[in-house]
Amino acid sequence: MAVKIAPLFVLFAAILWGTTGTAQTFAPATAHPIAIGAARLAVGGLFLLLVTLLLGRLNLKSWPIGLTLLAAFCMACYQPLFFSAVHQTGVAVGTVIAIGSAPILSGFLETIFFKRRPSYIWLGATSLSILGCALLFLTGDAVAIKPMGILLAIGAGLSFAGYTLLSGQIVQGRNPLETAAVIFGIGGVILMPFLFLFDMQWILQPSGIAVSLHLGIVATAAAYFLFSKGLQQVPASSAVSLSLAEPFTAAVLGVALVGEELNLLSWLGIGMLLGGIGLIAFAPKKK
């Protein structure tokens, strides 16, 4: 894999993640956001395991059990934390804090545990992207600031940063499909109780089936396979920063498919997001 191709796998993964919000708007009205998140992880994990088994790629010999359980726990925590943060403090604030805090926390964890200090290019590009993300989401309508929602959003950012750091270690020397299948299979089992806490009849409706399959297969299985593949060469801090392409995709789809409107500051935010992501993706590799 060429060095410049690896960041593109992460970018493609983030673009697929960006379809999540738009897809959820087509779910039945009775579908609870946390139930959708649990169904997403269950469908995605099961699909990855089935594909891995059919291809004969599952080899658990010398598997790092501790790291895998921690990575699966982080991913399982991300779903309810993120959706609960959005419920508490609104989509704008919840999304900005969760997505914006993840690169900062990832760089901090990478520095503490791996003594790998992020480059100045990463610092500048990540700051530019986070500011762009804030302009994109925090302009227009009034926003609600609730301490509990902020705390939940930071927890979601920490969960994603932890998953990325752990997954980046697990995938080294292993097949990305196998890595994603094991982590998400376990993560799906951890979130299984949520499927019994909410009314799941919506999932049997045509729109419920379509949304669940898209979120599970496209926005989870395919996206995290690409993300794992990119993590074989992209540092965790850079990978999390590149994942800021997710809100850009969500904004574009919101305008194109849902009929949302963006003001001038929001478009400026999109430009800053693209600039920061481009710097991280194509900057010279730090020696």
Image (cartoon, rainbow, N blue to C red):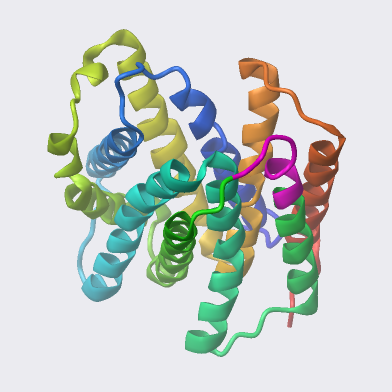
Side of 60 relative to 82 (left or right): left
Confirm whether the magenta stretch covers residue 235.
no
Residue 140 drawn at (x, y percent): 74, 35
**Residue at horizontal 68 percent and vertical 42 percent from the top:** 137
**Closest to the observer: 178 or 89?**
89
In the image, is residue 22 above or below residue 219? above
Q: Where is residue 138 in the image (x, y as percent from the top left)?
A: 69, 45
The quadrant of the image that shows the C terminus is: bottom right
Residue 188 on image: x %, y %: 23, 46
Above or below residue 261? Residue 57 is below
How many numbered marks appear?
Answer: 0
Who is closer to the viewer here, 210 or 251? 251
**Compared with residue 2, is residue 213 higher up or lower down, i.e. above or below?**
above
Q: Does the magenta stretch include residue 142?
A: yes
Please report the residue visible at 41 percent of the width from the left and 55 percent of the height from the top: 176
Main SS of residues in magenta: loop
In this view, which residue lies farthest toward the top? 206
Q: From which residue to which does the magenta span run?
A: 134-143
**Residue 216 point in image, percent of width and height:** 36, 33
Residue found at x 64% / y 25%: 254
Tell me, yes or no, if residue 221 can be seen here: yes
The residue located at (33%, 48%) in the rendering is 80
